[in-house]
Image (cartoon, coloured by chain):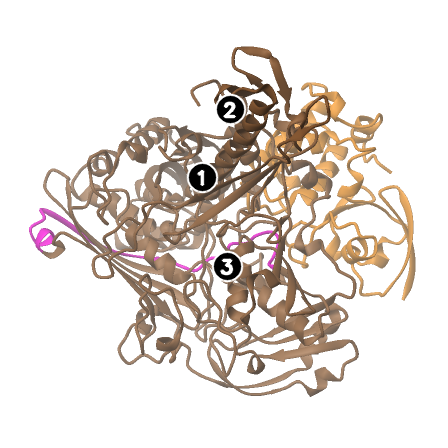
Chain colours: A orange, B brown
Amino acid sequence: MHEISLTVNGHHERATVPASMTLLELVRERLHLTGTKEGCGIGECGACTVLLDGLPVTACLVLAVEADGCDIRTIEGEAHSGKLSVLQLAFIDAGAVQCGFCTPGMIMSARALLERTPDPSDDEIVEAIAGNLCRCTGYEAILAAIRLAAERLQGRESYEADRVLVEGDEASLAKEGGGR
Amino acid sequence: MTAELRYVGKSVSRDDAVDKVTGAARYTHDLALPGMLHAAVLTSPHASAKIVKIDSSAAAEKPGVRAILTGDGLCYRLGLYMQDKCILARDVVRYQGEPVVAVAADTLDTAREACRLVEVEYEPLDPILDPRDALEENSPLVHPDLHTYEHMKGVFFPRAHSNVAHHQKVRKGDFDDAFASAAVKLKAEFYNPPVQHVPMETHAAIAQVLPGDRAEIWTSSQSPYTVRHLMSVAFGLPHASLRVHVPYVGGGFGGKAGLHLEPLAYVLSKATDGRPVKIVATREEEFNTLPSRQGLHSAVEIGADKNGGIVALKATYIWDAGAYADYGVNIGRAAAYAGAGPYVVPNCWIDSFVVYTNKIFGTAYRGFGHLEVLWGIERAIDRMARKLDMNPVEFRRMNLLREGEITITGEPFTSGHGSPVECLDAVAKAVEWGTPSEPPSEPYRVRGKGIAMLHKAPAMPTYTSCAAVIKLDEDGAADVLVSGVDYGQGTYTVLKQIAAEELKIPIDKVHVTWECDTAFSPYDWQTVASRFAYMGGNAVIEAAADCLQQIRDVAAQAFDVTPTEIVCEDSAAFVTGAPDRRIPYPQLALGYTFENGNSIGGPIIGHGRYIATGLTHLDPQTGQGLPAQYWTYGAHAVEVEVDTQTGEIEILNIVTAIDAGKVLNPKLCIGQVVGGVVQGLGSALWEGFRFDKNGRFLNPAFVDYKIPTAKDIPRRTEQILIENPQPDGPYGARGIAEHPMISVPSAIGNALFDALGVEFNTLPLDYERILLRIREKSEGA
């Protein structure tokens, strides 16, 4: 057993975990953050994507002990104070959600992209979610959603602000490697 | 209905989207109950073997193990159409991946480790792997007791002492005579491999047996009531003793219809004195333990007169049902009555054999056999056009079903069927059919265009029915209860639009209850066959009308007028011509109270229902009859570019036209079409099970079984939604969910011929197959 401490969606967490426990098991079973999904358990589908120190990782391939001292963000940290983020809103508006099982992982991959590359090209968007499998949508609407979120964050596309966000969210997205 | 629509036909955002983008949506995967145990299964390493001995003594001693079950103690045969499957293998295993032993333990790791400690002694047998061999007179039998199995009588005809689970015939006119005298003839053979649905949420179920022979089930299923019914039949329990919950479901595509892991979770809970037991398929089990789409061998013969009119068509469909054919039999049936494509065929002969083999078993998969048969038919139609020296679009247009014609099962084609011709013409125009492609950038790359038709009707029992209940709340809002499942299609959002439209209330005042629960949600057969928006929509319209009638009755009493004098509009009831004499819904929802305190009415609860109408069983000898509640027609046109040095194919453009009758929600409808097209692309270009010579499944993981990723989508797609109304559809709508996937491979196969001059008869059209065929052609030349 190993003592670890980490930050998850801004909250400090301590846990005693076996060496074999994955970050996915820690998040879902210990912290009860079940928004992060398991689609394959072997790093092939992307459903369990979370951000580890700002970088997207498949949580099923990361050991909980590897996350010791790290900053983890999951889909539950995406909305703030009951307000949806720009990305979440864009996924809804673009019709990028069907069964929804890949959606949390998709949004986390998209968030990592927009934090590093606020104005991504189409190829960069495709590349960012190439490891996230979706069986329902055919991806077009997901790519459109990420493009829409980028447009809105760049101020080139307006949206109903009252449905959105806390102050500072745009700033954190625009910040290179932000969110820490 | 002629008045302007406020919600129906509008791109309303999904009702469930907020839950899904925030991680709040709870799936069966996410559920846990106090005291819950976790189950794992040990599966067969052999495609066919006798089970000689099972020694689970070492596993039983492992701390934390609560129950170990083998097939021996479980004398249940399960199935919807054909009861041919046990919960765990008994005496023999019939496919590699079949569950043999199940363990329930305190943790999943313990259950899995215990499975590894179980020793099973097998006596391997020669597996039957090719359904064509299994049809031979002297073939060994996958199910020697087939003649004893219960099945849906009068619809399916298993052949005793053979591997044929069902033989569907269609006979119309005199094929032999017409083919013999045809001016132009074509014979061709085709093959589709089995493929997997790949829902992102693998199958999962939790069962808890309760005192008094009751049980609760939570399951990732398309079929709450069918799960309840089939378990009730299998275990001899009253229906009401079983309560089935279906929370959010992470994709289904047909693979979660019927019964899957629920019975196993139930018997494990029973074996542990009622502890809740959860079983979740691993991704590998999703591939090789849970069912797939069946493989298909097709042989097609077409005869035409010299002007290009089809005079005769014969098709032999040999389905690779795998080890069990519960759903396979109905796919064999549906694919036969749809097995000549959407064409006028005066002389038709179809045999569809559903044949047991020692492979993973088949089940419903989006398209329900139609993608498979239309792979052959639509490729053959293209080849026939060339034999006739005709433009493939012109040849199709000449032979497509239209008003006044009769289908191959004797159904008159009416204007209410929609228009296959409009679909064809729309996609042909969109890809500038007849105009050559722009030249590709490199000399070793070539381009081509292809076109294909599609059609499908819901394949369901003649008595399929469903219901809806609408309850009004204190604030005048409406709760809609149904038990069809929205596992991603968006049907609940569409039902919400319909309810708001009919009840004359704002759409945000309508709530569709997301968790289905057989204790509260009214009956629906199951969520399959692209029939939920159509049947559920009609049921919601009737339930809303029932609510309005109740509202009018109470308002009429309140104003001392007749109910026909009451009009409902803008969340209120008022007297015709006297808008000031009005009562808002909140004052009627639970009953109306006069100023003196007297009260009338009571809670408004409306009920609506819908049942398939006018369907008949098909004649066993001729297949004649009325199998279809409605047909949906469509077409795809594609433009492809092929690298002749590598075989790499790129889809430049795919245009899809579907006659939806009425588009209830354009955003969701287009989402279904794009998603279906890309899923069809998977079947066309990459997907297919591979087996070794012993019947072992070689590619049960995403690394070896590739589904489309974001990098694989077409450069451009276009959706054309045509609206020739369905007379009995809600607002004129017909189902469209499965259809976009059908005939995507056919259109690409036809485009590949246009580009390369090479005939492809076998799926998938992966780079390797394309390159090998290009080389064969150049070597031949």
> Which x, y percent locates residue A25?
78, 58
Check whether the beta carbons of the residues at disc 1 and disc 3 lie within 8 A of each other: no
Residue at 69% x, 36% y: name it.
Answer: B18
Q: Which mark is residue B258?
A: 3
**Element type at marker 3?**
loop
User: Does residue A147 appear anywhere in the picture?
Assistant: no
Residue under pointer 2: B563
**Element type at marker 2?**
helix
- From the image, state whether disc 3 or disc 2 is nearer to you: 2
Circle 1 chain: B
Q: Quadrant of the N terminus of chain B?
A: top left
Does residue B195 show up magenta in the picture? yes
Q: Which residues are magenta?
A: B177-203
> Which x, y percent locates residue B397?
23, 34
**Element type at marker 1?**
helix
**Above/below status of A67 relative to B580:** below
Circle 2 chain: B
Three-letter amino acid code of the residue under disc 3: Gly
Residue under pointer 1: B534
